[in-house]
Image (cartoon, rainbow, N blue to C red):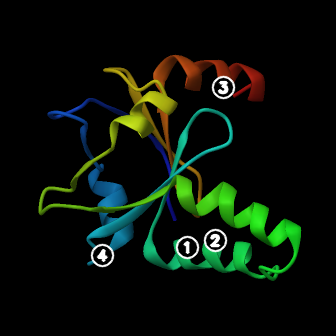
Amino acid sequence: MFLGTYKLYFSGKNRLILPKKFRQELGNESVIYIVLGQDGELWGFNSNQWLKEAEERLKIRLGKHLGRVQRREFFPQALQCNLDSQGRFILPQEFIDYATLNNGIVLVGAGDHFEIWNEGNWQKMKRILKI
C-alpha cells in the first residue's frame, strides 16, 4: 500500500526518483504506470493495480458510447515508465506541463496508487480537504 508524503526534486531533465518506501511497495517490479489525474495531479500505479484500473474501464463494451468515452479519457493519457536500478523514471514534458511540476514536487501515497503534485497545488488541496 502506498502511504506517506514525500518532497521530490527533478534529478535531471524530467527525471524523478521514486522514494525507497514506494520502491519497496513495488517489490521486484521495475515498471510503473502514470496517468493524468482529475485535479491537476498525476496518478501512479503498480502493475497489479494498473490492470485493475484498466479492466474497470474495459468492462463497458466498446459498442456502447460510455465504453468508448472511458477508453478515450483514460488510455491515451497513460504511460508506462521503466525504473532504473536507483528508482528513477522520466516523465514526458506533456505530463510535467499538465501537473505544472517544477522544483517543488510532492509525492503522496493514496493507498492503491500514488499521486504526483505540484507542491503549491497540493497545499491548496490540503486546505480544501482540511488536512
Q: Are marks 4 and 3 in contact (CB under 8 Å)?
A: no
Residue 6 seen in the figure: no
- Where does label 1 land, which residue? 49
- Where does label 2 land, which residue? 53
Q: Are marks 1 and 2 in contact (CB under 8 Å)?
A: yes
Query: Is label 4 or label 2 in front?
Result: 2
Amino acid type at circle 1 is Gln
Question: How far, Cα to Cα, is label 4 from label 3?
Answer: 31 Å
Q: Secondary structure at mark 4?
A: loop
Image quarter of residue 24 = bottom left
- Where does label 4 land, which residue? 29
Q: Are marks 4 and 2 in contact (CB under 8 Å)?
A: no
Q: Position of residue 63 (x, y in %)?
A: 83, 80
Q: Is residue 52 left or right of residue 96?
A: right
Q: Which mark is residue 62?
A: none
Q: Looking at the image, is mark 1 or mark 3 earlier in the sequence?
A: 1
Question: How far, Cα to Cα, is label 1 from label 4?
Answer: 12 Å
